[in-house]
Amino acid sequence: MKHIIIMPDLGQTTSEAKIVSWLRKVGDKLTMGEPLLEVETDKATMEVETYVGGYLRKTLAKPGDLVAASSPIAVLTDTPEEHCEEPRGEPAAPPPVKVVQEPFPGGLAHSPGRVAAAPAARALAKQLGIDLSAVSASGPQGIISKADVERFAAKAATTTEPVNASVTDRALQAMAALTSSSKSTIPHFYVTVDLDVGVSETWRARWNQNHPALKASVNECLVRAAAAALADNPRLNVRITDGRYERQPSANVVVVTGTDSGLMLIPLEEPHSGTFEAYLTRIKSALTSAKAGRAQAGPAVAPSLAVSNLGMFGVKEFSAIIPPGCASILAAGTVRDQVVWRDGRPQPARVCTVTVSADHRIVDGIAVAKFLESMQFHLNSL
Amino acid sequence: MNPSLPTNEQRLDIYRKMLLCRMFEDRVNSLFLQGRMPGTIHQAQGQEASAVGVCHVLQEGDMLTSTHRPHEHAVARGIPVRFLMAELFAKNTGCCKGKGGSMHIGDAERGMLPAIAIVGGGIPLATGYALSFKYLKKPNIAACFFGDGAVNEGIFHETVNMAAIWDLPVVFLCENNKYGASTLIDSVMKVKKVSTRALAYGIPSETVDGNDVLAVRQATLRAADRAREGRGPTLLELETYRFAGHSRSDPGHYRPKEEVAEWRKRDPIVRFETQALQTGLLTDSAISDCRASVDRELDEAVAFAESSPSPLAEECLTDVYVEQSYGKA
């Protein structure tokens, strides 16, 4: 008789586990309750015993595989020789092992699942702020060693990944490396304000009516106003490179945009300069070519401010992680109607909540507040 | 012969109950590994002497409270295993109609409140029962299992003190298995014995070999007699060990291998069997017959559970609140 061994649901917060090693090999005779394999859950590495005695005939997953709970992982039979294949033509059981793809949605605040790593590697990665899921393993059975982490750290420090890489894995790895290093090395602080977008939204509606072929989005207006405010506020227009703090001669902005393969950072030189029409043409073309995977020719820009927007998804407000090099990032929510108390009575208003995350090593709250005040001014005079 | 010692018939009953506890837990583990049973489980293999030794003393009308590790308590209290198994399968024939699960098994009508997974949570409830027994002049007692992790909770101190000053008929049973989840008791308690704590409340206490079912039974009998005679509560510390991790997702790596091996040698069931074979109470064939009969009982329980219906959506809110008037009739 054939017995299917499944991956038990052993995790505390996840229902999958990584196979560390098979403790017995195909052909071995097992008794009930004997440890068969070692698995790593989100919480611990532990042995899984067989619930039945018999001969181990097949293993259906290999060390390093992340396997969903309840998936079959091995086949045992009562006698060493008996048939254990499915007859032809019948639906195949055991079903194929469901190997879990580690989810990595395009959010900046995602924490990936547990990966197999040596304790020393784990400790070093924690110290360096490296996300282990981005590190490739060279050790036995796909376990990340301390050397792997050191290699990854050295590579991350010397290579500049093309910011508009469109290869999924590379984009994900770059995002994992950049965000973990940012969030663990930059002392973030946050300033939130409700921008009054009544005037700018009326203006935008009129613009769109007059320019049906070159419509402006809320975000394009926000980026333009933010760049102008950045130019007004040199204290915010700074970058840290190699531990040195540098004031920037021009006000450049990087726009964070989401694509199917992850997040992209699209640098724009002085978005507030030139006519609004020329600006719109420029930003739209930069976005299109970045999404198509083409890097745009042109001078390298060093942005000090990033702009991220989730307003199109109805998000009210959020805060973002500062991309390395920048001094701050502005996170914009949706434009919404709100009643405000003004001149002693309730009045309708259109507002957009923005949160600026800034690097407190080089920027203080007053600089951010002044920048936001200035941004409101520029929004009113697009 | 000391009349308080169990008869041969009682000893055989004790043995079968311990086997039923152990084999119930082993069966649950097997069902879990097969993916047939859902959920987190906290297993008690190794603690059978404590569960059975205590419950053997309890009478009809007495009330027991339990912990997050309640399976063996419920089996020992005599709740039929089919109702326990059905509860673990979340079926509406379960002792809590499938709405409680592993950490809440129990049946007040059969003398065990549905277990409470909050550490120390059963202590005030048992004491409340004891207060009602005393107030209503009933001959019953309450008994209350908790782990070593509970004795540093405020509720333990407050409740034991209250039970002491009012001489309530309750027996406090600390199953000291050395670890509160992964924390060694020595690292969180300065006194060496939990039983020492009783001095502070002015009540008697004993530290008992919790893997010797007869020692547990005799100590519980003394404590229960005191309680029934109106002489107040007793604190019993039952020194025992769980063979498995804290829960199914805990491999227990914090325990030295030698320590686990040492306690395995003190397996309460093996100890009982060895002694019983020497005295002639049991024979090898009696042991295998007993195991086979327990196996059949568990087969029947699993079949009953797996063929039972799931709880109905309409029953979501039943048994949530009790409608009762406390005014004059």
Image: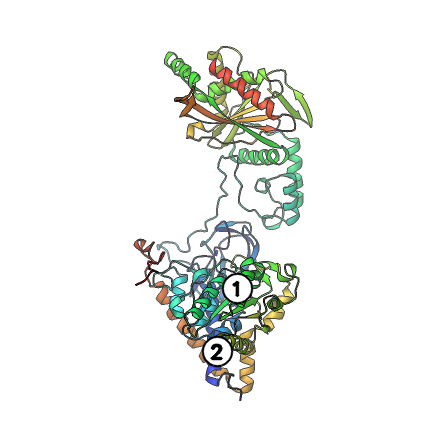
Give the class, few, some or many, for how many residues have Cα within 10 Å of label 1's Cα (few <14, many ≥20): some
> Is residue A321 in sight in this rendering?
yes
Q: Nearer the viewer, residue B113 or A88?
A: B113
Residue placed under numbered mark 2 in the picture: B14
Residue A168 x %, y %: 51, 34
* Vertical placement of residue A156 versus B258, above or below: above
Point out the residue furthest to the top here: A275
* Vertical placement of residue A56 versus A227, above or below: below
Q: Which of B8 and A53 is in front in this view?
A: B8
Residue placed under numbered mark 1 in the picture: B162
Left or right relative to B211: residue B288: left
> Is residue A78 in sight in this rendering?
no
Q: Which of B142 and B9 is in front in this view?
A: B142
Left or right relative to B167: residue B100: left
Classify residue B271 by image quadrant: bottom right
Q: Which quadrant is home to the C terminus of chain B? A: bottom left
Give the class, few, some or many, for how many residues have Cα within 10 Å of label 2's Cα (few <14, many ≥20): many
Q: How is the image coloured?
A: rainbow
Which chain letter goes with mark 1?
B
The residue drawn where x is 47% and y is 15% is: A380
Which amino acid type corresponds to the residue marked 1 in the rendered image? Met
Which amino acid type corresponds to the residue marked 2 in the rendered image? Ile
The residue drawn where x is 36% and y is 54% is: A91
Labels 2 and 1: the sequence-earlier one = 2
Circle nearer the viewer, 2 or 1? 1
Under tag 1, what secondary structure? helix
